[in-house]
């Protein structure tokens, strides 16, 4: 069994460059979609449910795209066709979203945009595992984090920069300002061009070469344990039905039906898959999810708390900052729109700090290991979110973003470095897709639970969602200490 040849710095640069464009679209979505929803008439209570399209799309799309890309080979290769298809669709969604005439059309376009970004993004994660030897994988993920940071900085700043250049930053009721519309147009073009660069400037190993280079034993093709899956499925199904009944009987927030639906869907999936005996994509994906390795389960808990916090930040920072730091919830007011632009600056700041953190993190791993480095970084992020409660001058919130930036860079790289060495090449895509379930599921939980918590326990104040997010990041850091530290962690992180 041979080892993959090491790639040069510029080869790694080219294979990761497309992430600049993908993150450009993702950052525009994160910083501006709540603003678009509010402008089109959504109340703060409605925002989490409207956002549900994004994580739900990822839950469906990522494992399917991973499974299919593992089995694809075309003139463009294995993963690159998905990069290109997703980029074209995402560009179209970015062009149309700021021109949405109604709230439901904007919510539908968010669904299209997030699905398209996921079509491109999931294979990019597997692409690093395909192309790089073990000693360079963390460097590849760090390069992705760098481009994520750079793309997000520019994209998040765009509305603010356009306003400084004299572009109109206010509009009539129900109309999206020109600063946001032009930012989305520019972002669509950048996304398509950056992904196109990676598609044209990289090559992929054919399947037979990948198998020859694989350093992990081929995954056993054992079918799902039908009896065990049916038992577990029945338990999850009953718990979900009981939860849905409780929401109905106690007249709780309808958003909580999302949680019950997740439980019901997983239980039903296990029962259906148990009868398929491993035949077909659905049964294999559900089987791999049900029987995933122990280390992956531990990392799933870490990812859950990390992404719960991030989703809370993305959907509630605009409401929190405009209300608390700029004193307005009127979407047609200058104060609200100045605050919304400042949120873009804050998001740009944390992504800029993340790009710098991507350079520092390999040094941290060499000194402290993967686990402790991740603990430190996400704890810094947690403290950054908690500081929103104490800071009143919005300019000082830039300091809070330093911690959030380190957490973001770490979340995007170190869990993948902990996981990727245990994943066989022929199933890299599907396992990365399943791992991304634990990015998506916490976002669905946040979308269903945060609105309920804020309404009933925190007086509807969106800044308290950032408090919950800060605590969640610290919990994620503590949970990573349960994960096994690979013996070769330092070598992987530094590329030696």
Image (tube, rainbow, N blue to C red):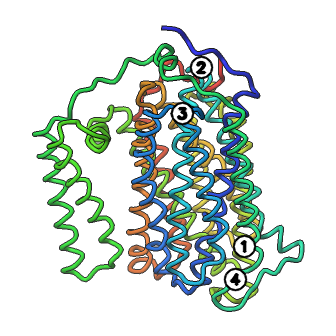
User: Viewer-proximal residue, 131 or 202?
Assistant: 202
Q: CA distance from mark 1 to mark 3?
A: 38 Å
Image coordinates of residue 87 in percent, x first then y, are 62, 52
Image depth: mark 2 or mark 4 in front: 2
User: Viewer-proximal residue, 51 or 445?
Assistant: 51
Residue that badge 3 annotates = 74
Q: Is the Cβ of the residue at disc 2 closer than 8 Å to that at disc 4?
A: no
Is the residue marked by circle 4 packed among few (<14), some (14-19), or many (20+) residues within 10 Å? many
Image coordinates of residue 351 in percent, x first then y, are 69, 52
The disc, 2 or 4, on the residue closer to the chain's N-terminal end is 2
Image depth: mark 2 or mark 1 in front: 1
Name the residue rendered at 54%, 37% in the picture.
Answer: 79
Q: Is the Cβ of the residue at disc 1 closer than 8 Å to that at disc 3?
A: no
Asked if 426 appears above or below 377 in the picture, the reply is above
Residue that badge 1 annotates = 180
Q: How many marks?
A: 4
Name the residue rendered at 70%, 47% in the picture.
Answer: 20
Give residue 336's mark: 4
Q: Is the Cβ of the residue at disc 4 closer than 8 Å to that at disc 1?
A: no
Image depth: mark 4 or mark 1 in front: 1
Q: Is residue 348 visible?
A: no
Asked if 99 appears above or below 400 in the picture, the reply is below
The disc, 4 or 3, on the residue closer to the chain's N-terminal end is 3
Compared across the picture, whether 482 is left or right of 375 comes to left
Is the residue marked by circle 1 packed among few (<14), some (14-19), or many (20+) residues within 10 Å? many
Image coordinates of residue 460 in percent, x first then y, are 48, 81
Residue that badge 2 annotates = 135
The disc, 4 or 1, on the residue closer to the chain's N-terminal end is 1
The disc, 3 or 2, on the residue closer to the chain's N-terminal end is 3
The disc, 2 or 1, on the residue closer to the chain's N-terminal end is 2
Q: Quadrant of residue 339?
A: bottom right
């Amino acid at each position: 069994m041979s080892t993959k040849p090491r790639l040069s710095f510029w080869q790694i640069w080219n294979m990761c460059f497309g992430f600049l464009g993908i993150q450009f679209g993702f950052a525009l979505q994160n910083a501006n979609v709540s603003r678009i929803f509010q402008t089109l008439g959504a109340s703060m209570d409605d925002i989490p449910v409207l956002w549900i399209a994004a994580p739900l799309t990822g839950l469906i799309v990522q494992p399917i795209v991973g499974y299919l890309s593992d089995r694809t080979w075309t003139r463009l290769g294995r993963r690159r066709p998905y990069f290109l298809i997703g980029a074209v669709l995402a560009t179209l969604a970015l062009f149309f979203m700021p021109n949405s005439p109604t709230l439901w059309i904007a919510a539908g376009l968010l669904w299209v945009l997030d699905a398209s970004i996921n079509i491109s993004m999931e294979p990019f994660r597997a692409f690093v595992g395909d192309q790089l030897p073990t000693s360079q994988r963390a460097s590849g993920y760090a390069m992705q984090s760098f481009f994520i940071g750079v793309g997000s900085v520019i994209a998040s700043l765009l509305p603010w920069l356009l306003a400084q250049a004299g572009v109109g930053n206010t509009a009539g009721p129900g109309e999206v300002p020109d600063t946001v519309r032009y930012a989305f147009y520019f972002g669509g073009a950048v996304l398509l061009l950056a992904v196109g660069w990676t598609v044209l400037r990289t090559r992929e190993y054919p399947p037979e070469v990948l198998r020859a280079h694989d350093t992990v034993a081929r995954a056993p093709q054992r079918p799902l344990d039908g009896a065990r899956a049916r038992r577990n499925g029945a338990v999850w199904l009953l718990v979900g039905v009981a939860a849905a009944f409780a929401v109905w009987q106690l007249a709780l927030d309808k958003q909580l039906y999302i949680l019950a639906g997740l439980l019901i869907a997983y239980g039903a999936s296990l029962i259906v898959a148990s009868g398929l005996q491993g035949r077909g994509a659905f049964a294999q994906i559900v089987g791999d999810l049900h029987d995933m390795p122990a280390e992956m389960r531990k990392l799933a808990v870490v990812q859950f708390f990390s992404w719960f916090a991030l989703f809370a930040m993305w959907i509630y920072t605009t409401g929190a900052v405009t209300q608390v730091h700029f004193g307005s919830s009127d979407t047609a007011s200058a104060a609200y729109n100045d605050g919304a632009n400042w949120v873009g600056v804050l998001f740009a700041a944390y992504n800029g700090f993340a790009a710098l953190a991507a350079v520092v993190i390999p040094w941290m791993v060499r000194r402290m290991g993967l686990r402790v480095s991740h603990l430190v970084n996400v704890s810094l992020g947690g403290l950054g979110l908690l500081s929103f409660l104490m800071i009143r001058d919005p300019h000082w919130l830039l300091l809070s973003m330093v911690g959030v930036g380190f957490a973001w860079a770490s979340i995007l790289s170190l869990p993948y470095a902990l996981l990727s060495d245990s994943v066989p090449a022929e199933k890299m895509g599907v396992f990365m897709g399943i791992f991304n379930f634990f990015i998506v599921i916490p976002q669905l939980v946040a979308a269903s639970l945060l609105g309920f918590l804020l309404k009933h326990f925190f007086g509807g104040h969106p800044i308290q969602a950032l408090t919950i997010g800060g605590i969640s990041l610290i919990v994620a850091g503590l949970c990573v200490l349960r994960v096994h530290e690979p013996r070769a962690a330092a070598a992987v992180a530094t590329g030696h």
